[in-house]
Image (tube, helix red, strand yellow):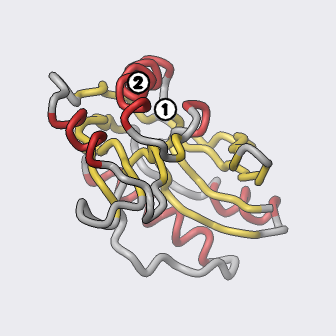
């Protein structure tokens, strides 16, 4: 199973982002992520068979609840050669603590620790190098607001990712409360 941990995005924020994508989608033929797939990843685990072991380790994570804001748009790896369009996440240090603790919990089972700096975000679209995005850039520059809301994080989830003909589908497996 291909696994990751993440914070679920509430309906209110999904609705605002869905409105945004409705405005932007006609400007670029890129691979838009379905709203049901939107989340804030805390740890990519990858292919892992020991579900019970992962669940047991994730249950040891202790971070107090916190709030994050979803605001702004950006490009990975950079604006000049974008591969991903994302919504930004402004968060307190507790989100970084959650990432570090989920990373450490998984590492105790042999899952490789992250080597890149943690950069929380919501992936809105994936872009192939050959896809033009100039009209998309223009549409983004004309947006009146890029504030999507605040969410209270009181838990995180273990997800499974399944490859299907229409793209990846993410399913929640188990919720882990913060505190």
Q: Position of residue 48 (x, y in %)?
A: 77, 69
Q: Residue at x 43, y 65 (%)?
A: 129
- Could you say which disc has been placed on residue 166 in the image? none
Q: Secondary structure at mark 2?
A: helix
Position of residue 179 in the picture relative to residue 82 (left or right)? right
Position of residue 27 in the picture relative to residue 31 (left or right)? left
- Could you say which disc has been placed on residue 13 in the image? 2
Position of residue 96 in the picture relative to residue 12 (left or right)? left
Position of residue 104 in the picture relative to residue 73 (left or right)? right
Q: CA distance from mark 2 to mark 1?
A: 7 Å
Q: Secondary structure at mark 1?
A: loop
Q: Residue at x 30, y 25 (%)?
A: 149
- Could you say which disc has been placed on residue 9 in the image? 1
* Relative vertical location of residue 68 with respect to residue 79 in this rendering, above or below: above
Label 2–label 1 contact, CB within 8 A: yes
Displayed quadrant of residue 44: bottom right
Q: Position of residue 40 (x, y in %)?
A: 46, 46
Q: Residue at x 65, y 40 (%)?
A: 175
Q: Position of residue 110 (x, y in %)?
A: 67, 82
Q: Position of residue 144 (x, y in %)?
A: 15, 22
């Amino acid at each position: 199973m291909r696994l990751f941990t993440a914070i679920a995005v509430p309906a209110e924020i999904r609705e605002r982002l869905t409105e945004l994508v409705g405005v932007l989608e006609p400007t670029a033929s890129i691979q838009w992520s379905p709203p049901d797939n939107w989340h804030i990843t805390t740890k990519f685990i990858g292919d892992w068979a020991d579900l019970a072991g992962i669940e047991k380790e994730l249950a040891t994570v202790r971070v107090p609840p916190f709030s994050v804001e979803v605001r702004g748009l950006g490009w990975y790896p950079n604006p000049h050669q974008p591969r991903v369009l994302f919504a930004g996440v402004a968060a307190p240090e507790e989100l970084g603590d959650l990432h570090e603790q989920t990373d450490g919990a998984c590492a105790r089972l042999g899952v490789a620790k992250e080597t890149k700096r943690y950069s929380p975000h919501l992936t809105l679209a994936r872009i192939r190098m050959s896809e033009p995005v100039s009209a998309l850039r223009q549409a983004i520059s004309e947006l009146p607001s890029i504030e999507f809301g605040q969410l209270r994080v009181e838990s995180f989830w273990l997800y499974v990712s399944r490859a299907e003909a229409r793209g990846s589908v993410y399913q929640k497996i188990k919720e882990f409360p913060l505190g």
